[in-house]
Image: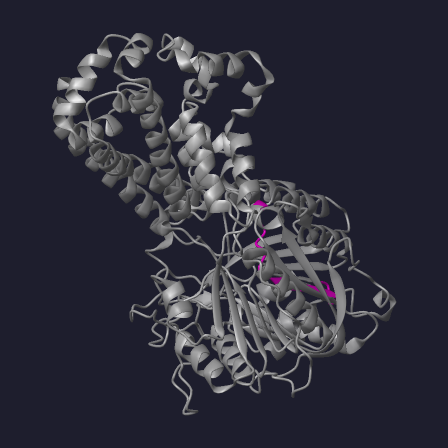
Amino acid sequence: MIDGMDDKDSTSRYLEAGQNCWRKEPAEQVAFLIDGEDYFRAIREAIAQARHSILILGWDIDSRMELVRPHPDDGLPTQLGDFLNEVVSRKKSLHAHILIWDFAMIYSLEREWLPIYKLGWKTHRRLHFYMDDKHPLGASQHQKVVVIDDQVAFVGGFDLSKWRWDSSEHQADDPRRVDPNGDPYPPFHDIQMVVSGEAAARLGDLARTRWQQATGEQLEPVAADSPSPWPESTPVAIHDIDVAIARTEPEYGEKEETREIEALYLDAIAAAKSCIYLENQYLTSKLIQDALIKRTKEEDGPEIVIVLPQQTGGWLEQHTMDVLRDRLLRELKTADKHHRLRVYYATIPGTQPQFVQIHSKVMVVDNDFLTVGSANLSNRSMGLDSECNLAIETQTRDEHRRGIAAFRDRLLAEHLDQKPSEIARMMEHEGSLIATIEAFSGGERTLTPLEPLTPPEVDSLVPDQQFLDPERPIEGDKMVDLFVSKEEQKPAGGRMLGAGIMLGLLLLLAILWRWTPLGEWLTPDRLQGLFEAIAALPASPLIVIATIMLAGLLVVPLTMLVIVAVLTFGPIEGLLYSHIGATLSALLAFGIGHGLGRQSVRRLAGSWVNRLSRRLGERGILAVIVLRIIPIAPFTVINMVAGASHIRFRDFLLGTLIGLLPGMLALSAFVDGLLRTLREPSWRTAIWLLAIIGIITLGMYLLRKGLLQRKQSI
């Protein structure tokens, strides 16, 4: 018999607040929602009962998603956005707060366009929508939490988004499994856990804290003065049990790093006696790998069963994250000297592809412990992204053991096309998780052994985990290295002296940058730290614009400033701040040049100023545009020379506004596109990045070809 069913294990403890979880709180009711049909129906029923507060945290959202299929005749809309708006509109005391990760334009092919319009501007004033950008470089808001009136809360792997709805039958030709455009998608499997009582109230605190960090607005807790909004279609699996809340939160600003989920997994794996059952989208975490390998080497270690997707989402993921997974699987299988490890994928006949896309994040240990949440078994979920998991242990009650065992049996029954009672009977008979699975294997719908598929030639081309699956924020200077040459990153004085002291007025600055401690501050990492500190200030847009303006005047490479701004503030705000700051910097240098006069500038910069001055005066706006796109001298030098030339201020201003935009827009799109592709690789993001590169390349080629002759004449 599997250990954990015996009373001698009743004192087993897995959870320790402050170590592997944030806190433990009592829950009056606990249930498990397996697959989208059950979850989205339950979430709709709970939200419809809300009286005071709806809190939603997510990685993605789609206002067009049909929550229930077919439509019920209850007078409420079925599309998410219309449904939320209607519910909020009906109750004057009800506010909804929705916080979603601030995705970039590279995701526009797979996400809803203008969600802030659909769920913010277009909806009721008590429906508050915000996109969360308060996370370090390379990270995302990945928590999937919904809290209703601080009385009922849902946590798991589900986003309220397209491509998530499916029934537990995962039928090959289910006409209901279509996206908002009516296009079918493959079978999808995920899990959400729902709790009531104090555990739900504390998840409300977590959601409010996240909202405050993202928006600066503090929300008040809700008094439990109304009936519980528990969804009527959801049967309770476990009563009266303590629920642990575990988090991953990266270091950001004044917030310290939190790695509770990682500790939770490691402690539970170490405590396992008979069996470990895992379902997850990814398996790339080195620490999890090491913990599993350690258990496989033990003489009396537990059985380990892992269910993964046969392949992840798209071509790029399959050639990055799947390669890392295959490397890990090879090491696991090599270490499995006692043959207690099995890795499977769920096969569904008649579908294309013929497997279920596993998106769940679940671990069950013996019959004593389980965790459900948003965290993948990847490095980034252990330390980089914001994650939330719930966990329970049996404590001293057999009811709790039966509830955990029934949850695992239901998952196996779905994958093996059996009844949960048959799985439970076989588990009792065999006393082995692996033997139970193998007893029912071999049908059309089954669990099939997963073998590493990556060819050696592909494996050799893929870098290690530190780049593809980072566990901590990406350092700004490493990202800047991809786009800015080492020569450009040197202190401005070195570049100026190497160019022959083009402007004598900047000689003092060159000496300060090169031979004093001030030169240590002109690095990408320090610039990003400065920008992030500015971002926390009330007047951050004005301050960062002024910073870019002065930095540009002091010959800090404009390319570096744009990249750091995009990495810190995102593609839209970063581009806007950079463009305004660079334009103001150009105007300031123009004014300095005008004040010095042409003769003074000529003596400082050289005889070529006369020729440039004449051409600027003759060509006007066009000459300035050419020099912005194809510069022949440092940014500040051109601006000062222009100020001392015959060019009119209006022409200089318009030429600068127009000429700076193509390069900045291209750089912003490319930096953001590459970063997002590395963060969440898929074939869609890869296509979008390639499209960006293609458009930039073609546009710059045509632009340069048309302007090159103009430059030669200048």
Task: Tell me which corner region of the image, top left, top right, bottom left or bottom right, holds residue 366.
Answer: bottom right
- For residue 589, say whether it is visible: yes
Check if residue 371 falls in the magenta segment.
Answer: yes
| Residue in view at x 16 percent, y 33 percent | 702
Quadrant of the rendered image containing residue 153 = bottom right
Q: Is residue 361 left or right of residue 645?
A: right
Q: Residue 483: x, y in percent?
A: 39, 29
In the picture, measured across the screen, residue 455 lies left or right of residue 225, that is left
Locate the N terminus and report the quarter of the image it occupies.
bottom right
Determine whether 410 is above or below 322 in the image.
Answer: below
- Residue 623 image point, x, y percent: 18, 27
Residue placed at 51% from the left, 48% from the top?
539
Q: Nearer the viewer, residue 42 or 643?
A: 643
| Residue nearest the observer in this picture, 284 or 586 | 586
- Vertical comparison of 143 with 486: above or below: below
Taking the magenta stretch, the answer to whether it contains residue 68 is no
Question: For the magenta stretch, what is the residue range?
Answer: 365-379
Q: Residue 386 appears at what percent x and percent y?
A: 58, 54
Asked whether the viewer can see residue 456, the reply is: no
Q: Is residue 546 above or below residue 36?
A: above
Q: Is residue 46 above or below residue 349?
A: below
Q: Number of numbered discs present?
A: 0
Residue 714 location (% of width, % of height): 16, 19
Q: How is the image coloured?
A: one colour
Out of 618 and 253, give the one closest to the viewer. 618
